[in-house]
Amino acid sequence: MAVLAIVEERRSVSIVDASAEVGMAVDQLRPLLNHVLYLEFRDNNDELISKTAAFLLDEHDELVMTDQHWLRNLAATPPSPSVALRLLVACTVMRSLDDTAQRPLDTAIAKLERLVAADVVVPVDRPPMLDICEHARSLRRTLRIRYLKDALSEVSDREVAPWSVYSNWGKWYAYGPDFGDDIAKSFRVDRILTAELGEHEFDAPDIVTEFPELFNLEEYARTVRVRIDPGALDGLPNPLRLGPRIDIGDGRVEVDLTVFSDQRLENLLLMLPVGTDILDAPEYADIRRTAAAELLELYSA
Amino acid sequence: MFGTLCPVAIGVGALTTTQGSPAERILRLAAYLDEHRVDLTLSAITANVPGYDDGTVPRDHRGEILEGKDWETVRKKLNRDFKDLEESFGIVVDFDDANRCYEMQKPFFTQQERRALISAAAVVDVEGIDDDAAPVGELGTGVDEASRRVVLRVHAHVVALCDAIATRRAVAFRYHGSLRTLEPYAVGVWHNHWYVMGREREPDACRRYRLDRIDETADPDASVAIQSLDPADCFDIPDDFDRSEVVRLDPNDWGSDPLVRARIRANTDYVPSLQREFGGFVVERNADNAIVEVDVRHYVSFLNRLLGFREHALLIGPPVLIDILRSHLQQAAAGN
């Protein structure tokens, strides 16, 4: 029963929420649940077989698992291929995050690997400051950090309140406001140069579940249309979005290259190989010349 | 509090209890199986679990059901219930012909393993695999999202490629317009992009492809971008294939330019970023700067990536790289 699976995985769920998730009216769900909640009978030898200790529907209509999910304990069928793959990826990441001995996780991973029967490599980044961020979060203590916003920004010294620490798009973030501020921000943990616990304590929201929508970068998108040797495209650094290529017949292709900040655009222009024509926008050619000249001075000094 | 028990006739056991609904009967059957892992004969099960024998099925003095129409009816009913148990709960019961009894298959995951899996699913949100299709009740689909700390997106092609790898089927796809036929060995993620690695049949070489750069099909006759080819089991993955190769994508690892050791003078605050980008080692340091040495095997890629640091990290050796960089900057400054 799907409802019992939810109860096991969350430890408790309201019958109203459970019925919504399985698409069944509460009045239809109750009698089915009763079969499990009050499962007890005597066999032919008058021995009592009882499973009433496993689940409970309390006076608040909250379904609770009070013992074991004895039905799932008997399940012999393996998960479906897609579920197995999903679990394998989750467990592989989990294993990387927590390197304490976890034999059940290891044996579960081994079973999933046999099921999936394909090598799926999921390296997990653990930036050096991750542990102290987690520590600050758990203590609800501020963190004094020296932070480099990106490779081309200036460094800032600040004190932040890490409400949560999470990973998205392959990077770890400490999410919370500058201490004393209201607006929460995401600080990339791998860009924290130094960190130490601050003296202040903070109150975090009870639950920080929604990861910030900071990856919709379209407002920062900057596109340059070029004619370029296609072999040079793979040498341009990420993140970079390539548009469709049009073969123009002289060995080059015409393509849109999109990056997501003005600074990255300037870098991209600087990196374009000799012989690349910048079609749109025309002013980008000037930006390229200027940036190259400035850097050339440093290499000529 | 456990509430009020459903009325159960207590007395001489299952043969005189209320029949109950099919759902009740099947759950009681599961409970009985949980308590009695051995001696699961048709006669024993139907005598002890309410709902199979209302007292009218003929039995001998040992309680064994006599062969005949009633035996067949009860047997079919039991087998249907076993089928329901398998479909509803994954509980599998086989019939052992030699011993003339039923045997429950061992659970796939132990309870401890299942707990570990659920914990992992609670912490790590894996998106991109049947996001809308996974039925509620599948392992890991009911977790509380409040615990999630990691979001990882799996490219849509990963499932098809894993299936191809598992069945040793080659795949065909278009990549930058060209048709490729690949015997896939492994998939992996690097810098948030998914890759597949394997042997490309033409030109019989190991290749790696970024999945988001596989052409999406515009062919109305082709329903998917990646076609699995028959037959299965048509290739072996070499024993010496190193799975980590699929994500060994730093050009400085695989480039074919003559190896040189670059020396970079970097502002102290940018050294961690620089090392994250290139690896390398700090060989000198003062209050403001550090010298980082990096092995370079792909000059263009290295110099492009170094340019991203602008004035914060300057190349100071070797001359061959400085010459390439200076020439590039001169040409770019001249508008070429």
Image: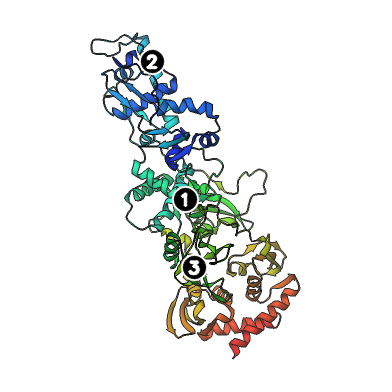
- Mark 3 or 2, closer to the camera: 2
What x and y, as percent, mark residue B65?
30, 13
Q: CA distance from mark 1 to mark 3?
A: 22 Å
Q: Quadrant of the C terminus of chain A?
A: bottom right
User: How far apart, in angstroms, are the residues tagged by discs 3 and 2?
Assistant: 65 Å
The chain letter for the residue carrying disc 1 is B
Q: Give the chain letter at badge 2.
A: B
Give, as a three-letter code, the residue at label 3.
Answer: Asp
Residue at 60% in and 46% down: B224
Q: Which residue is mark 3?
A: A190
Q: Against B25, is A291 above or below? A: below
Q: CA distance from mark 1 to mark 2?
A: 44 Å
The residue at which mark 1 appears reads as B147
Three-letter residue code for mark 2: Thr
Q: Which residue is mark 2?
A: B18
What kind of element bears circle 3? helix
Observer able to see residue B94: no
- For mark 2, does the 10 Å Cα neighbourhood hold few (<14), some (14 to 19), or many (20 or more) residues? some
* Element at label 2: loop
Q: Nearer the viewer, residue B60 or A22?
A: A22
Q: Which circle's residue, 1 or 2, is located before the other in the chain?
A: 2
> Quick check: B31 left or right of A140?
left
Q: How is the image coloured?
A: rainbow
Residue at 58% x, 69% y is: A237
Spot occupied by residue B268 in the image (x, y as percentages of width and height): 49, 80
Residue found at x 63% / y 44%: B222
Mark 3 crowdedness (10 Å alpha carbons): few <14, some 14-19, many ≥20: many
Does label 3 lie on the same chain as label 1? no
Q: Left or right: A25 with respect to B84?
A: right
Q: What is the secondary structure assignment of the residue under circle 1?
A: helix
Residue A58 vs residue A5, the one in the foreground? A58
